[in-house]
Image: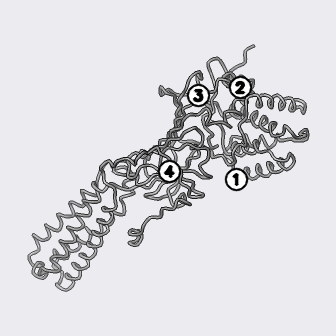
Amino acid sequence: MTHMRLFRAKSDDLKGIRARSAVVRSAEVAPQRAFPRAITRDEARAALERSRARRAMNGD
Amino acid sequence: MQPWPAEVLEERAGDVAVAFASLLTRQAAWCHRRVETISVISHETVRRSVSVDFTVPAEHRADLQIAEGQWVVPLAMLAKRALVHFDLRDEAAESVPLLRAEETRIITRELLYLVLDLDLADVESDDIDAEQLIERVVAMAPPRSADLGVIDVELAALEARAGGLPGFSALAGRLAHGFPLCAVVREVGRRRVLKFAYDEGLGRPSRLTHFYDAPGCIEAASYHAEVAVPTELRARRTQLADDATGELFASGPRDADRPALYFAGAWAGVEPGISVRYGTERGRFLVPAALVAWLIALELALPWLLGDLGRLASEAGPAISILLSSSAVFSGLVLRAGEHPLLRVVLAPSRLWLAIATIALVTAAGALGFHVASGPLRWIWGIGALVAVVAAVILTVQAARAPTARRRPVRDDPYAPV
């Protein structure tokens, strides 16, 4: 630590603070893209049926 | 014939995926609150405890049931990497089982096909084959950057063929990096609180400023975070902010020993995290250290300015005793057992200044004791006095800027959004 650094005021800018800090990662994954919309149960159920039918047809 | 436990999930994966599709796209609607407690264990390790307070929507309970008295709940999206000291417990602090990686993979595979089909609803999709891409995404090994690059390329190619797959791309992007933490609970008919915890290392050395990534802050209707600050340290400021833009979303009380943050929102920037700046309390070390440094400075400066050092050199016994007694105080301040490792790291520079002042003192005392000639003796004492004054000034400034141990009044309302 230099004398100048000791007396210097600390930056309050939070932009890029991660690079100036000791970082503790989270085990959780941040969403890179938001889901465009919420999915209802009926939509999901219908999509599952279609998807399974398509995969069965393709022999998956 | 009844299926064996390992076969049950194969049968139930589709139904569970139906529920997951709704739950993962509307988390704030069923997760009431997330509380994260960050405890600084040492200068190298932090323990993060996350409690999730939720109610499984009634319409999804049957879909989530995988066996008699067993329901799967996606608590969080965790990164595909080894977790240290991981623990999952319920309200009664009893251990909660988790789905195995292979079981989780069966569900996420179904989920990806399901969401892909939703995106393809209005498209002629018979020639869309995403099997290879989906298998890459659901692989459980920690992804290498090359793997992620291949996934990005294949995803872009698929989107080009199908004309935009916003839901599938968002889900595949997350599942390429992580997997849903699937707790197996014995009851979903009421509001539940489950808690998971794990240790994380401090990624880069910085004594005073820590940044705790907080991607989970938007995954519930409200988010609370607390930092358990080690003894003799204070959180000078605690802020939830986006590292990419610097936008501030919540701010905790200043100079707190357990600062709390509150946030409720659907967006907290690209790289949200909690920035904490620590400081040492002034009373336990900094003030005594500054006083000792000033005492040393006076012990050296006054004889140098006013005393007859040549005469002192011939009758040095009492003077040396007085001088060396100060170094005993130094030892008392430096050698302290049971100190938190982070505090030790934070105080290291201050202790160095005190050590420098003490070395100046011992050198001066030694010069006196060994009857150094009058000329060099004056130089040694003069330089020693100067060094001690510099150390004393620095320690005084640090003590003046440090927070007090007294509990400060909490900022008007710690839970008020900024």
Which is nearer the N-term, disc 3 or disc 1? 3
SS state under label 2: helix
Image side of residue B168 versus residue B179, left or right: right
Residue to which mark 4 is pinned: B418
SS state under label 3: loop
Tell me the crowding category of disc 1: few under 14, some 14 to 19, or many 20 or more residues within 10 angstroms, Cα based.
Answer: few
Image side of residue B3 versus residue B289, left or right: right
Q: Which mark is residue B9?
A: 2
Q: Are marks 3 and 1 on the same chain?
A: yes
Q: Which mark is residue B145?
A: 1
Residue to which mark 3 is pinned: B55
Residue B114 image offset from top left, x and y in percent:
78, 34
In space, the residues marked 3 and 2 are separated at their CA atoms by 23 Å
Chain holding disc 2: B
Chain holding disc 1: B
Q: Quadrant of residue B125?
A: top right
Q: Identify which amino acid the numbered label 3 is placed on.
A: Thr
Q: Compared to B282, does B168 lie above or below?
A: above
Which is nearer the N-term, disc 3 or disc 2? 2
